[in-house]
Image: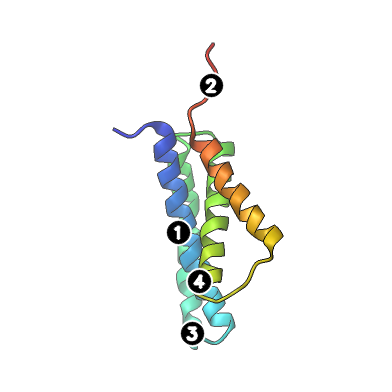
Amino acid sequence: MLRSDHKALLYGLGLALSDVVNLGILKALSNGMIKNFAWIAFPTLVYAVQPFIFYSALSHTSMTVMNLLWDVLSDIFVTASGLFFFKEHLSFKKHLGVLFAFMAVFLLTGDDDNKH
């Protein structure tokens, strides 16, 4: 059975991957890769569902940790999508920022050392 912090990580991954798809569609619309503007309905519908997913995730972790997991994982995956699919570029300093984002995920999902 999964521990609560692992469940929170899975929720964060799901939310982040939905951001990758949504933002990818929006980027493709903005640069003309997708021509039919009706595609904007898909991200709109997904964003309407995300609060319910976030609400469900709160039974496994705090609002603070869940929000940070979602934000940081989304940043990592959306960055990867921009780099590999849309051929965007990052400076060395921004690459360091992505590395720190990975470290943040590790720190947020690890065991707490609080022994009271």
Left/right of residue 65 with respect to residue 52 in the rendered view: right
Quadrant where the N terminus lies? top left
Which secondary structure, mark 3?
Answer: loop
Q: Which mark, by number, is residue 95?
A: none
Left/right of residue 27 with respect to residue 8 in the rendered view: right
Residue highlighted by disc 2:
113
Identified at 59% across, 37% down, the residue is 64
Which residue type carries mark 3?
Ile
State which tag comes first along the sequence, 4 or 1: 1
State which tag comes first along the sequence, 1 or 3: 1
Q: Nearer the viewer, residue 60 or 76?
A: 76
Residue highlighted by disc 1:
17
Label 2 CA crowd tier, 10 Å (few <14, some 14–19, many 20+) = few
State which tag comes first along the sequence, 2 or 3: 3
Query: CA separation, marks 1 and 2?
Result: 30 Å
Residue highlighted by disc 4:
84
Position in image of residue 7 (x %, y %) = 39, 39
Q: Is residue 90 above or below residue 38?
A: above
Position in image of residue 84 (x %, y %) = 50, 71
Identified at 49% across, 74% down, the residue is 85
Q: Please tell me whether mark 4 or mark 1 is closer to you in this view.
A: 4
Position in image of residue 19 (x %, y %) = 50, 61
Query: CA separation, marks 2 and 3?
Result: 48 Å
Query: CA separation, marks 1 and 3?
Result: 20 Å
Which residue type carries mark 1?
Leu
Identified at 59% across, 81% down, the residue is 30
Which secondary structure, mark 1?
Answer: helix
Q: Which mark, by number, is residue 34?
A: 3
